[in-house]
Image (cartoon, rainbow, N blue to C red):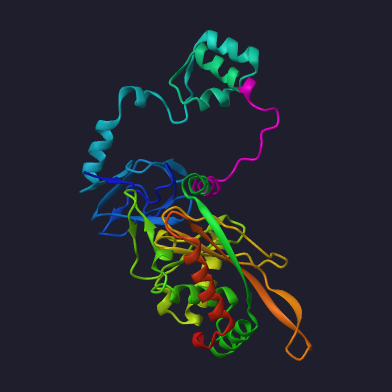
Amino acid sequence: MIGIELPTLNTNDSSYTLVEWLVPDGGSIEGEEPLAVVETSKASEEIESSGPGILHVLVGGGQECRPGQTIAYLFESAEERDSYRASAATPAAASAPPGAGPSITNAARALADRHGVSEAELRGLGRTVVRTADVEALVRRAASAPASPGRQLSKRQRTVGAVVTESMRTVPAAAAYAKVDVGQAEELARRLSERTGSFVSLPVLLIKVVARRHAAHPLMFAALTDDGAVRESERAHVGVTMDAGRGLYTPVVHDAAELSGDRIADLLTGFRSKAFRGTFQAAELAGANIMVAPHTTEGMVLATPIVFPGQTCVVSVGAVDDQVLLDAQGTPRTHRFVHLGLVYDHRVVNGRDAMALLKDVKEELEAPAALG
């Protein structure tokens, strides 16, 4: 008999949801193959078997489970599993039919009736014997509950809240902003889209430009360690904030400096689809060493995102704003501007370094020929 333990899939979660078993209880497994789908607050992951055997499920589909918990056993044969099931059945368990309720003392039953505590609430206690003290606890809980309970946050949103709280608690952030004329960048994006068939947008070019600054600005891609040292990264892995109505995700464009604009565009298109369906794999959300936060909804000018713990910088971009300016001959011309923001961990990055990165990104977006 081999126990199948649930690995740690997301360090921010203390529990996961076992969505479904891909192999039925008692089913035969030939080797290393997917057994179950487990959902964390960020992604869905498949749990694989370590070898062949007969599956014996301990945690049903739709139930919560915790890291390190044994969720199933693998037996060498059906006979071994049957022997285990027979030995595991206790007299108490055998005498209680499936779905049987708890034993309720007469005093507890009377108290429950007096206060209108339902049978379902008593069953929900999960106790073998319900006593007066258990009913009193239910009554006190009901009395202290608000008359109109508020809307419960989703597990994913609670995880986002925990990350935001940790960032605000631990990262002394500062911010700087630059105004960027993106007329040429938008024209380049249009031409690349027509040539490649991919949806190349301004955020796509921004990801590429930020990644290309890795060698010149290594501190922007670094991580502050617990002992006060700075761990620099070898490559630029750019995370992108993304919310399609199913919660905030931060998928990662790995090795972004090595990718073409149309390849980054295709990745973002796939990420948006997964954000809408909530079907990211954990590997797609891991490894970012800098973040890009597009806030391109029409009318959005400035945005100040958080610096994610473990990173030092996040670059934000607002929506495009048309402005009419006079050229050198005094002729009014329309220019397309965005406000580019940089929020940074001031323990690692100083204002001069932040301004230098913003200046480099601004210059390349305003003259983006090298990106084509």
Q: Residue at x 50, y 73 (%)?
A: 207
How many marks overall? 0
Question: As rendered, which of 330 and 19 lies closer to the eye?
Answer: 330
Based on the picture, tell me whether residue 60 belongs to the magenta stretch. Answer: no
Residue 64 lies, in percent from the top left, at 44, 41
Question: As rendered, which of 174 and 283 lies closer to the eye?
Answer: 174
Based on the picture, tell me whether residue 149 belongs to the magenta stretch. Answer: yes
In this view, 109 is above or below 216? above
Instruction: Read off the magenta span.
Output: 142-163
Using residue 145 as the reference point, say whether residue 348 is left or right of it.
Answer: left
Residue 197 lies, in percent from the top left, at 56, 85
Question: As rendered, which of 53 and 321 lies closer to the eye?
Answer: 321
- Quarter of the image containing the N terminus? top left
In the orientation shown, which residue stands out farthest toward the top?
107
Residue 235 lies, in percent from the top left, at 36, 71
Using residue 327 as the reference point, say whether residue 172 is left or right of it.
Answer: left
Residue 336 lies, in percent from the top left, at 69, 78
Q: Residue at x 34, y 63 (%)?
A: 232
Using residue 297 as the reference point, say whether residue 231 is left or right of it.
Answer: left
**Residue 91's image quarter?**
top left
Q: Residue at x 54, y 22 (%)?
A: 122
Question: As rendered, which of 241 and 342 lies closer to the eye?
Answer: 342
In this view, 255 is above or below 159? below
